[in-house]
Image (cartoon, coloured by chain):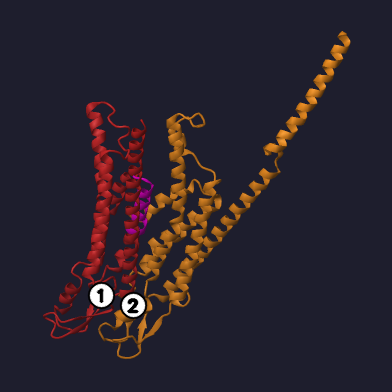
Chain colours: A orange, B red
Amino acid sequence: MDWGALQTILGGVNKHSTSIGKIWLTVLFIFRIMILVVAAERVWGDEQDDFICNTLQPGCKNVCYDHFFPISHIRLWALQLIFVSTPALLVAMHVAYRRHEKKRQFRKGDQKCEYKDIEEIRKQRFHIEGSLWWTYTSSIFFRLVFEAVFMYAFYFMYDGFRMPRLMKCNAWPCPNTVDCFVSRPTEKTVFTIFMIAVSSICILLNVAELCYLVTKFFLRRSKKAGNPKHHPNHENKEETKQNEMNELISDSCQNTVIGFSS
Amino acid sequence: MSWGFLRDLLSGVNKYSTGIGRIWVAVVFIFRLLVYVAAAENIWKYEHDEFECNIKQPGCENVCFDHFFPVSHIRLWALQLIMVSTPSLLVVFHVAYRENREKHYNQKLYKSPGQIDGGLLCTYLISLILKTGFEIVFLVLFYKLYNGFKVPRLVKCDMRPCPSTVDCYISKPTEKMIFLYFLVATSCLCIVLNLSELSYFIFKYSIKCYLKRYNKKCQ
C-alpha cells in the first residue's frame, strides 16, 4: 500500500474529468507525489539526526527540534496530498453508483436501457451533467478549501516559507539560549518554494475548472430556455392553431363539394 | 508480504458490501493505511535512537525506554489495522462457501451468492460487531497504556540501573501526538460508520418482518 494505490484509484476518475481536471491530475502525480517520493523524502530523511545544537546537555536537541518543527514539512505535504486527492473519490463513488444502476436496469431487461452488454456499461464515460455536475463541483470546492487550509497552516507554523540556517533555542533543559543548526536549509527552502508554487498552480487550475463548469451550466440553461422546440406550451399552441386552420380548410372544402354536388 | 496483501483482500470485500461498507473501506485505505505507510511510520522509525536520558549510566536508557513504551505506538497502530480489517474476511469466506455449494449441487441454491440475506446477513452483522469491538478495544488499550493520547516531551525514570531519578526526553513528541489524535479521529469515524451500517440493517429487516406480519394478518 503506497502512493501507487492512490494513483490507481484516481486514474479511474480521470476518464470522467474535464480537460482541466486531467491537467490537474497530471500535475498532482508528476510534480507533487513523484517529487515527494523521489526527492523530498530524501532531503528530509536525516532531519533530526543532523539537527545539531551547540550544547552537550542531553535532551536539549530533542526539545528544541520539537519546538521548531511541531510537524515536519514532509508529513504535512503527505497529509495535504492525501486530503486534496480525496474529494475526487466522491466523483468515483457517484460514477460507480450510476454504473451499478445502469447494470441493474440492463439485467432487468428494461427497454429504456440502450446498452448492448455489460462491458459497454463498464467502459462508458459519463458526461458531467445533472447530479454528477453537483458532485464534481463540490469535489473541486473541497479541493480548493483543503489546499488553502494547508498552505495557510504551513505559513503559520513556519513563519513563511524559508528554512533558516540557525535557530536560537532556550527551552528547558537547555542551560541558556543555545544555537541550533538545521541540516540542508537551502535545499529544503528550494523544495518548499517548489511545492508551494505547484500548490498555487493547482489552486489556479481548480478555480479555472470551477469557472468553466459554472459557465457551461449557465450556457446550457440559457440554451434550453431559448430553444422553442423544447418549449411544451409553445408547441401545444402551434399545434392547436394548425389544427384549427386545418379544420377551417376542410370545412370550406366540404361546403364547396356539397355546393357543387347540389 | 506487506500492506498490499491486505489491500487486495479488502478490495475483494468491497464487492459484497453496502454503500456504507464501501465508505468504510475507503476510509481505512486512504485515511489510515496510506497515512500510516506514507507518514506515520517514518516518525517512529528512530524512536529508540533518539530517546535520550540525562545520564551516561549504561543500560539506563534501554530500561527507561522499555518501561515507558512496552509496545510502541506504531506497532499498536499496525496491529489495530490488521485486526480491524480481518472480520471482513468472514463475509468473503461465506460467499465463497455459498458459491462452492452451488457448484457442488450443480444448481442455483441462492438468488445471488453475494446478496446479503439469510446466513450471509448474520455473518455480515457479526463481522460489523467484531470490527467495532476491536476498534474500541485498541482505543482503550492506547488510552490505558499511555495514560491518554498525549506524548510528553520529558519523562522521569528511576528504574535500575539508573542511579537516581533521571530526565529522559522523547523525540518528536508533538508530531507523534498529532498523528495519534489523527488515529483516534479515524478510529472513531470507523466506529460511527460500523454502527450506522448495523442500525441500517436492523432497521431494514425489522421493517421487512413487520410488513410480512402485517400482510399475513390482512390475508
In the orientation shown, which residue stands out farthest toward the bottom? A176
Q: Is residue B214 left or right of residue B131?
A: right
10 Å neighbourhood of mark 1: few (<14), some, or many (≥20)? some
Q: Is residue A14 above or below residue A255?
A: below
Question: Which amino acid type is marked by label 2?
Answer: Asp
- The dot on residue B50 is 1
Quadrant of the image containing the C terminus of chain A: top right
* Helix, strand or loop status at disc 1: loop
10 Å neighbourhood of mark 2: few (<14), some, or many (≥20)? many
Residue drawn at (66%, 43%), measured in percent from left and top?
Answer: A224
Q: Is residue A30 left or right of residue A169?
A: right
Question: Which amino acid type is marked by label 1?
Answer: Glu
Nearer the camera: disc 2 or disc 1: 2
Q: Is residue A168 above or below residue B9?
A: below
Q: Chain of mark 1?
A: B
Answer whether residue B15 is visible to the viewer in this image.
no
Q: Give the x, y percent position of residue A52.
A: 32, 81
Residue drawn at (34%, 36%), measured in percent from left and top?
Answer: B212
Badge 2 and badge 1 in a common chain: no
Identify residue for label 2. A66
- The quarter of the displayed image where residue B65 is located: bottom left
Q: Give the x, y percent position of residue A41.
A: 37, 65
- The dot on residue B209 is none
Is most of the magenta stretch helix, strand or loop? helix
The image shows a total of numbered marks equal to 2
- Separation of disc 2 and disc 1 at Cα? 12 Å
